[in-house]
Amino acid sequence: MKKNLKPYLICMIAAIVFSAGCALFSNNPLLTFIDVLSILSLVFIVVGLLEFLIHGGYFDFLSYSFSSAKNLLSRHSQPAGSQRYFDYAQKQKERRGTSSHFVLKLAVLLLALSILLTIFYELL
């Protein structure tokens, strides 16, 4: 098995086992399984989109403003104009590196599985 597919498979199995565990205690297990899987996928989509935004640097201005405020309020502040926002953003971008957006891809896989199971449930 490819090394990069292993985490997806492990998380998919964990989500399916969790959904199946919740479905065991209901009157309609397949419908409950689909519902829990859909909710998990939507939560993962929100977390994945947040990860995408953070990795894209959309929140660098917040961290820059907090670090600037800390420098302003501390006793041993750095000289004024020591680091501009552009320099700070470039340094953060280099530090972040690359991302595979694992959570977002996992969420799409879980949502696709949930949609397929919903279609199967409607055909029964």
Image: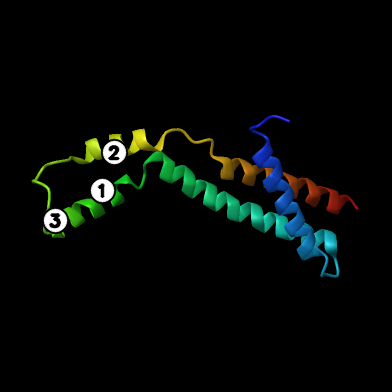
Left or right of 122? Residue 44 is left
CB contact under 8 Å: marks 1 and 2: yes
Q: How is the image coloured?
A: rainbow
How far apart are the two marked residues, 3 and 1, measured between alpha carbons? 12 Å
Secondary structure category for the residue under label 3 = helix
How far apart are the two marked residues, 1 and 2, measured between alpha carbons? 8 Å
Between disc 2 and disc 3, whose residue precedes? 3
25 shown above or below 51: below
Q: Amino acid at mark 3?
A: Leu
- Neighbourhood count class around disc 2 (C-alpha, 10 Å): few under 14, some 14–19, many 20 upward: some
Instruction: Please name the residue shown 83% across and 59% down the image.
Output: 30
Query: Residue 117: image x %, image y %?
Result: 80, 49
Query: Residue 2: image x %, image y %?
Result: 69, 29
Instruction: Please name the residue shown 66% across and 41% down the image.
Output: 8
Left or right of 62? Residue 105 is right
- Neighbourhood count class around disc 3 (C-alpha, 10 Å): few under 14, some 14–19, many 20 upward: some
Q: Amino acid at mark 1?
A: Tyr
Secondary structure category for the residue under label 2 = helix
Q: Quadrant of the N terminus?
A: top right
In which quarter of the view is residue 109 placed?
top right
Between disc 1 and disc 2, whose residue precedes? 1
Instruction: Please name the residue shown 8% across and 46% down the image.
Output: 79
Instruction: Please name the residue shown 65% across and 41% down the image.
Output: 7
The residue tagged 2 is 89
The residue tagged 1 is 64
Disc 2 versus disc 3: nearer the observer: 3
Between disc 3 and disc 1, whose residue precedes? 1
In which quarter of the view is residue 43 placed?
bottom right
Left or right of 1? Residue 68 is left
Secondary structure category for the residue under label 1 = helix
The residue tagged 3 is 72
Q: Amino acid at mark 2?
A: Ala
